[in-house]
Image (tube, helix red, strand yellow):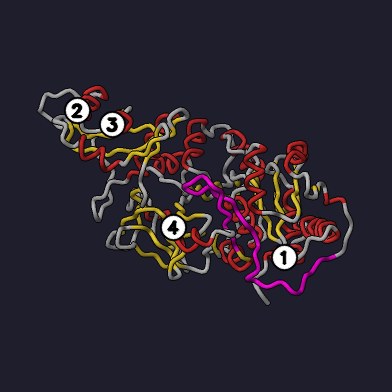
Amino acid sequence: MGLLVGDVIRHAARVVPGRLAATMGDDELTFGDLDVESNRVARALAARGVGRGDRVAWWGETGLEAMPIFGALAKLGAAFMPVNARLGVDEATEVIGYARPRLTVVDASHEAAAFEFVRQAELFHDAARSEGADVAERALEERDTHVIFFTSGSTGRSKGVVLSHRCSYLRSFPNLITDWEGGTVCMFPLFHMSGWSMALNAWQMRLPVHFSSPEAAVLLETAQRRRASRLYCLPAVWDRVLEHGHAGYDLGSVRECDTGTSATPPELLRAIKAAFPGTATRIYYGSTEAGPATLLGDIDLARKPGSVGLAAPGVDLRLSEDGEVCVRSEFLMDGYFEQPEATEGALRDGWYHTGDLGALDDEGYLSIVGRARDVLRTGGETVSPGEVERVLAAHPAVAEVAVIGLPDVRWGDVVCAVVVPATGRGHELSVESLRAHCDGRLAAFKQPRRLEVVEALPRTPATGQIQRTLLVERLSAASRT
């Protein structure tokens, strides 16, 4: 008996058929409904020639109609490939053309656009209305491909991250047993791995997942209405929630306020704890390729500021000679779809090389300090932060400096100098004086366009390395408020 995702749905339907599996707004789906509907969709797909080893693309908005399609493909042994609902026709054409699915499934909002690029492929829509009994493909194996998630590589070309049934099952297996029946509010869209991982994790515990847009009012309303026990938001979304405020909402059911994926400033964590007293907060670090990598528990939030925690259960963690974070576990991807060179570069001797630079303290807690290929792209030009820092460090008004890139619609990255000023020297500290200092030393596009003055740069406790990712998140959060 292998670890198959279809069995997660079957088992929950046998044990708690009337319990909610998923909600979004007014829409609800029980475990019994999910099992029956996924069987019906599977029959309809099989009638169109879809079977084990095939690939099927899904291009649609987040909604419960995607649930039976996901379940049907898991039961048939065909790979589910969600495509970003925000892509334009040309972008979607590139992604779907790369994946070459046997079938492309769209929702009503994408149907017109789909016909522009699926002229020679079959279009399937609203299969849930077809009939069919239980579907059980006995030949399936846990190492069969379950999903392919698309990510953008450093060159801009899409990469298809291939995950097996075994991998998806293990990533979502409950790491704790709880009797909190409210379920979790999920702000991630269903073209994102985290959306499906959170759904599977809830289903393994026979609990519901409540899908929501990332707008603060909608998240809080969903948590109140569904009596949810867990809120998981990215740091940027937590900023919105805290700015919006939760006065007037009954959130007494919420027990966990978790975050992660990007750098999480300690001051944001303190604000979450103050706004939601009595709740637990955890920080998760991982990726589509690696799954869960580290976890910082609630008990360590104040003790380990800026850290993303210890290696997650079942994960081995190390730093390469140049400080790159590497992880090894049963959660790793099989590789990138039909990109052997990219796969070989990422998976070496069983270790996934994350591309993040890290530091480990004397207790084994990890902090992310930057990217292994830490370059900025501004106006189409490449800038090395270290090169700019070496020049700026010689400015008489600069005691310490870190150069980072802040996202910008026009430039891509804006070169930003974060400076601890030197005291008692009487020199002007401004963007203009920094650029004047760089003239003749650095090309104009490498010179800072923004200056931020701080009292201290965030550093790792053990090695004193500057935490660039934390600086980016702090300054980005400040600009959003």
Q: Residue at x 59, y 45 (%)?
A: 188
SS class, disc 2: helix
Q: The residue under label 1 is which amino acid type?
A: Gly
Quadrant including the C terminus: top left
Q: Are marks 3 and 1 in contact (CB under 8 Å)?
A: no
Q: Residues within 10 Å of mark 3 (few under 14, many from 20)?
A: few
- Asked whether residue 16 is in view, the answer is yes
Q: Which mark is residue 295?
A: 4
**Residue on which disc 1 sits:** 77
Residue in front for this viewpoint, 312 or 161: 161
Residue in front for this viewpoint, 139 or 63: 139
The CA span between labels 2 and 3 is 12 Å
Q: Residue at x 44, y 33 (%)?
A: 412
Q: Which mark is residue 437?
A: 2
Give whichever of discs 4 and 3 has the lower sequence position.
4
Residue 447, how many percent across, how many down? Answer: 29, 30
Front position among marks 3 and 1:
3
Residue 33's place in the image compared with 247, above or below, is below
- Asked whether residue 176 is in view, the answer is no
The CA span between labels 2 and 4 is 43 Å
The CA span between labels 4 and 3 is 42 Å
Does residue 142 belong to the magenta stretch? yes
Give whichever of discs 2 and 4 has the lower sequence position.
4
Quadrant of the image occupied by residue 336: bottom right
